[in-house]
Amino acid sequence: MRILVVVAHPDDETMLSGGTLALLAKAGAEVHYLCATRGEGGDLGEPPMCSRDEVGQVREQEMVCAVDTLGGSSLRFMDYMDPTVGEDNELFAFVADEEEVAAQVLEEIREMDIDVVITHGSNGEYGHAAHLKVHQCVKIAVMSFTEKERPLLYSFQGAFQGHPKERVMNQDDAAHVILDIASVEVEKLAAITCHKTQHGLFLRKAIPDEHGKRSLRYSLMPLESLHRIYPMVERLPVQDALANLLAGMEGVRILDKISTPEQS
Ligand SMILES: [Zn+2]
């Protein structure tokens, strides 16, 4: 099985879905990565590890390291420029025509003969404009295939009760698969370690442990999830090639009913 993961920035693959992607590689899938930007607008490190001009190159290498650690097969960048974070932490999307981005994704799917595409959710996780844009463009790309040739389309960070970090959960995407990633925690933590410029940010956003201490280990979510976008799910459990591949794996639950998060 050939999987294409499409994300907006280096580190999205690891922080939002690293355990799932490591599990899929372990199950024997070829996992290819396509990233829209090099995260040029992101943190430079604490203290800064490079200049603003260099951070794209540095983060490219960090993602090379993470993809390798997660057992990925290839990594390509779409070369869009990630705008810097605005005042009041406003997050912007890269500037690009949606159809043009979709055409690149489509080309990649065709060239690599991809069976399953995994990308950002319909709420951009925490509403990040670049995540939303990638979600939209990937959907356009997948839906432009004929039904016969169209790959499966999944998104990460689906909603379920007991989600370890509700801030990044896509409220409108019910989880169809929940993955306890304990068996690949070492790989996920090693991939987090690769993204050195972002460690300060990860620590600020990490869930504190029982002593109120934040560590990189606590920035990793022990549970991850997948939501199937295409084909639209009419009945649970989802049954397809990806679900079949995951079904036998330790810690994977293919849900037979929707796990609705409590409204807070
Ligand atoms: Zn991102």
Image (cartoon, helix red, strand yellow):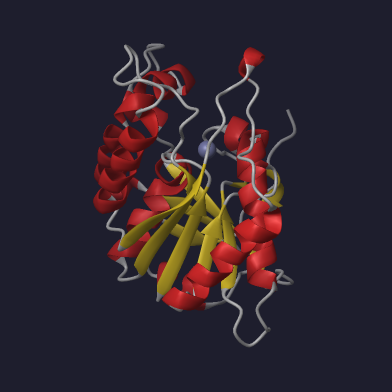
Q: Would residue 243 appear left or right of 219 to someone viewing this image?
A: right
Image quarter (top left, top right, bottom left or bottom right) of the C terminus: top right
Image quadrant of residue 145? Answer: bottom right
Q: Is residue 261 above or below residue 5?
A: above
In the image, residue 65 sits, relative to residue 142, either above or below, namely above
In which image quadrant can residue 74 be found?
bottom left
Residue 147 x, y percent position in the rendering = 68, 84
Q: Quadrant of residue 128?
A: top right
Q: Residue at x 27, y 33 (%)?
A: 193
Q: Confirm whether residue 239 shows in the render.
A: yes
| Residue farthest along the bottom direction in this orientation | 148
| Residue 170: x %, y % from top left | 66, 43
Q: Residue at x 62, y 19 (%)?
A: 86
Q: Position of residue 185 (x, y in %)?
A: 30, 43
Q: Is residue 138 visible?
A: no
**Quick check: 62 above or below 145?**
above
Tally the numbered discs: 0
Find the residue positioned furthest to the front: 53
For the N terminus, give its image quadrant.
Answer: bottom left
Residue 23 left/right relative to 41: left
Q: Is residue 128 found left or right of 14 in the rendered image?
A: right
Q: Residue at x 34, y 28 (%)?
A: 54
40 relative to 204, above or below? below
Given residues 79 and 187, the one toward you in this image is 79
- Nearer to me, 246 or 13: 13
Q: Position of residue 175 (x, y in %)?
A: 62, 54
